Amino acid sequence: MQQLISYIAPAAPATRRPAKGKLPWLRPEIGFTPKWYRQTLEIDFGEKWHTDLDYREETIKLMRRELEVRFPGSSIAAIDQPEMQPDILTGTFGACIISAIFGIPIVYSSDNWPCTSKDYLSAEQIDNLEVPDLYKSEIFQNLLGQLEAIRNKHGIIKGFMNWQGVLNNAQRIRGEDLFLDMFDNHERCRHLFDVICRTMLEASTIVQKIQSDSGFENSFSNVSNCLVNMIAPEQYREFLLAQDIKIAERDNCFGLHNCAWNATPYLNEYSKIPSVAYIDMGIDSDLERARQLFPNARRSLMYTPMDVKNKDINQIKQDLLKIAAEYGPCDIVAADIESDTEDEKVIEFIRLCDDISKEYEQSVSAG
């Protein structure tokens, strides 16, 4: 079964990509915020970065060089994997493209990922919502133009758009009223979730086809359920499980992102989704149960940037040993690291993962 692994391109939010070759027992995936890069390189991550392809490509090269200098020999942002380049697509429009297709304005920042404005749709607008005509969508047409420009320049279109998940996109479109609707107006919620799901599938299918025609295979589905802990497991089952299953069934290779929350209450429902090739969660989750339910998926542990910064090395080591024993083999994702975390701490974090992986590999070989 094809597995997916965590992937954090320079200054991009974490996403997933297909796994290749033998993976270590603990595979670290390190990511830094746009602010981390801007403080050294003075890159402007505003609208120009997301719409001006040449500027984005130039700054990605600068960021990769910075990583190579500060973390030589590491695999941060796949700097040790030339076959991943040129990836000038991952990170484009951050996590906002689906909500923007529905007309929610993107708010850009010079030192952060873009976010959406709070110009949410009203109840009446939601009730009358339909799948947008993507070929009349300004932002989607901008994306298609960028894909064409990448192909004209490089021949192949590498990288991964971040389509988010149905619940995440719904909150960006409806705002906090979404969670009231889930109690007061079930039909409105079902309608909104269905329209979003169909839009995600249509948009991602178009982009995947264009990438495939260029020679880059991107045949997997991937959702982000960052807000799932704001709803009960019963609500997930009632409103969202069917949508995630529908997305998973398209490619038969499915990634499921939960952030660093405790995913335990949702694991039984998640286990009903077919072809799960990746799943992540926080350290407070029932890791052994997750490994039991998802033996064929590449599991991943979202290790918070606060823990990377604030815990001492011995505390981090104890965490990693626990994760290795209860959850491995898995990825260890340390994303969103800021400049107040010393480079040496990051290097030591990677070294700990490598050392523990070697111990497990020796144990397997001896067995």
Image (cartoon, helix red, strand yellow):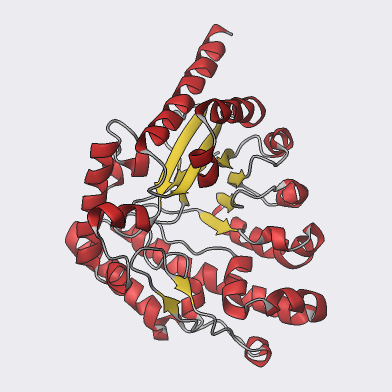
* Residue 306 on image: x %, y %: 53, 45
The residue at the point 60 percent across, 56 percent down is: 248
* Residue 227 on image: x %, y %: 64, 62
* Residue 320 on image: x %, y %: 57, 29
The residue at the point 47 percent across, 84 percent down is: 133
Query: Quadrant location of the N terminus?
Result: top right
Residue 2 in view: no
Taking 84 as reference, is 111 above or below it?
A: below
Q: Quadrant of residue 348?
A: top left
Query: Quadrant location of the C terminus?
Result: top right
The residue at the point 59 percent across, 67 percent down is: 168
Residue 114 in view: yes
Considering every residue shown, the one lying at the far bottom of the view is 124
Taking 303 as reference, is 143 above or below it?
A: below
Answer left or right for 199 relative to 190.
left
| Labels in figure, total | 0
The one of 242 and 193 positioned closer to us in this rendering: 193
* Residue 235 on image: x %, y %: 78, 64
Taking 207 as reference, is 293 above or below it?
A: above
Answer left or right for 79 relative to 28.
left
Q: Quadrant of residue 39?
A: bottom left
Taking 122 as reference, is 248 above or below it?
A: above
